[in-house]
Amino acid sequence: MKWLVLLGLVSVSECIVKIPLRRVKTMRKTLSEKNMLNNFPKEHAYRLSQISFRGSNLTIHPLRNIMDLVYLGNITIGTPPQKFQVIFDTGSADLWVPSDFCAVQACSIHARFRHLQSSTFRPTNRTFSITYGCGTVKGIVVHDTVRIGDLVSTDQPFGLSTAEYGFKRIPFDGVLGLNYPNISYSGAIPIFDKLKNEGAISEPVFAFYLSNISIERKVIACSGGCHVIVDTGTAFIKGPKSLVDNMQKLIGARPRGSKYCVSCSAVNTLPTIIFTINRINYPVPGRAYIIKDSRGCCYTTFKENQLSPSTEIWILGEVFLRLYFSVFDRGNDRIGLAQAV
């Protein structure tokens, strides 16, 4: 069995491996201090290479941190390989990239798959449509060879977008979903399930049960228990609007446009928000849930979960996952969390 490590996302086999992490100053903070934040993504292409330990069961696939909001990794599709930057998304199950016959602006500014240049391309007559929190993508289902580092899935079904709405400003080309096959919108078998069926790796990802959320020992949400999704494709922490609004009020955040801001000088004094999962506390301090933008506004990373407004479902995105090393064992329907040090 082979392991795949994706910035703390692990596909688990028969044992648990401890991987030490080192806290460093984030790219956002370093570039902001040097007034280089706005131009950096255009001037510096992604140059990290995949690291493989031959003869072992560990593959490390580095992901690129874009402003502490999303994490991208390189994959290739086709023969010869065409490179794409995608989000490794634990909240969805589909793989898709833009097609060369997608004419909308969102596709034209990203890498597009040129199917006529691939000798292993195989079309189908199936279509798909997926709605995310940021927009909608529509397209067709096709087959080709997909590579993640030295992991190779031949004749892998995936989506080619023919139309994208709401994706014009995003820094990634497509999405690689890691969730269960039964939530796939395209009906295609997810790449990690196909790799597992072929004996290449074991299984990733799943959603789990949250006990409560508290600030300064006061329970502010999930008092009777609720459900939560751990989602590497979401930058923020999302929950029901009324509870998120209460959270903003308790930490003293004030609305400014679509954001809630606090005084940057008060960040270190903000209360710690504690997520209690299976009677274990996972604190998220103020410095972790506040982000300073290029205009000097320190805003909170709590947002309304618009996909499930009527039920108490919380989504723990990158804000939470940056603090905790996460092991997803989908084969046994469980997740392991450990503090990143």
Image (cartoon, grey):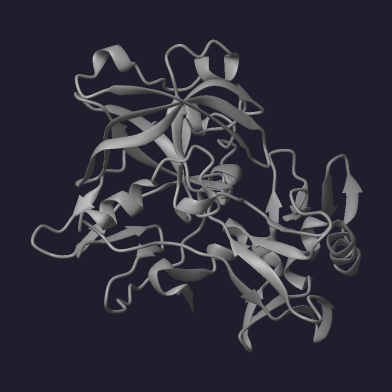
Q: Residue at x 23, y 27 (%)?
A: 81
197, 213: nearer the viewer: 197
290, 245: nearer the viewer: 245
Q: Is residue 333 visible?
A: yes
Q: Position of residue 184 (x, y in %)?
A: 51, 45
Q: Position of residue 327 (x, y in %)?
A: 42, 70
Q: Residue furthest front?
A: 125
Q: Position of residue 3 (x, y in %)?
A: 26, 63
Q: Residue furthest bottom?
A: 279
Asked if residue 147 is positioned above or below residue 101 in the image, the reply reads below
Dividing the picture into quarters, in which one does residue 152 lie? top left
Dividing the picture into quarters, in which one does residue 6 lie? bottom left
In this image, 222 relative to 30: left or right? right
**Quarter that holds the C terminus:** bottom left
Dividing the picture into quarters, in which one does residue 321 lie? bottom right
Q: Residue at x 87, y 39 (%)?
A: 257
Q: Residue at x 46, y 66 (%)?
A: 23
In this image, 242 relative to 225: left or right? right
In this image, 308 relative to 200: left or right? right
